[in-house]
Amino acid sequence: MPADEVATLKMAELQRRLDRIRAGIRTDAAAFPSEESRMENIAFNVLLAVQTAVDLGAHLIAREGWEPPDTLSATFTILEAHAVLGGATAEAMRSGTRLRNLIAHGYARVDPVKLVASAQAGLDEFARFLAEVAAWEQERP
């Protein structure tokens, strides 16, 4: 069965956020600490990418009638339990929720170099998340 409209829109939104992150980190990472507006742009898009993935997961969970998550990271645990995501992808996405919380709540200033490294690593993890969700959507009865 093809993805529903909400899932399709969320997946497209996540891809747009990933494209913005990719565009923001294309230059020398050593320059980032001195480029506050670019760092904020990357952080904002990382936060929104994780939030969009959570929203997509919550939509799938609600649509399927599965138990609701009690935390953001539990969204990915539930998706893993129902074979939407593999274990490595679910763990990567749970880690993403921790980074999202650091950015959103300003728990000390996020280290720019670590943020860029996490954003770069996250691009592949988000791509895997999208691929696994799309494959599950195509295979579901």
Image (spheres, grey):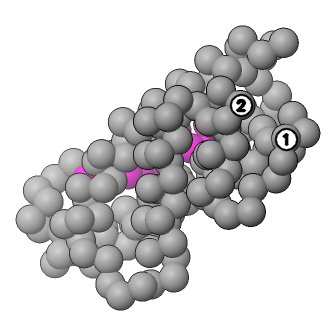
Question: How far across and down, in percent of the image, does residue 121 sit?
Answer: 30, 45
> Residue sitting at 87 percent across and 34 percent down?
64
The dominant secondary structure in magenta is: helix
Per the rendering, the mark at residue 40 is none
The answer, for residue 23, to whether it is visible in the render is no
Label 1: state its secondary structure: loop
Q: Where does label 2 land, which residue?
A: 82
Judge whether residue 21 is colored magenta.
yes
Image marks 2 and 1: residues in contact by CB distance under 8 Å: yes
Going by the numbered disc 2, the residue's amino acid type is His
Q: Earlier in the sequence, mark 2 or mark 1?
A: 1
As drawn, 13 above or below 37 = above
89 vs 42, left or right, is: right
Between 95 and 10, the one lying in front of the other is 95
Q: Is residue 64 left or right of residue 103?
A: right
Q: Which residue is drawn at the image coordinates 37% and 42% (left, top)?
A: 123
Q: Is residue 93 above or below residue 40?
A: above
With 76 as the anchor, is 126 left or right in this view? left
Task: Give how far across and how far down residue 2 sits, in percent.
Answer: 78, 16
Depth check, front residue: 104 or 41: 104
| Magenta extent | 11-25
In x, y percent, where is residue 55?
70, 51
Q: Quadrant of residue 111?
A: bottom left
Tell me what residue is drawn at x 67 percent, y 20 percent: 136
Disc ID at residue 66: 1
Mark 2 vs mark 1, CA separation in Å: 9 Å
Three-letter code for the amino acid on which mark 1 is drawn:
Trp
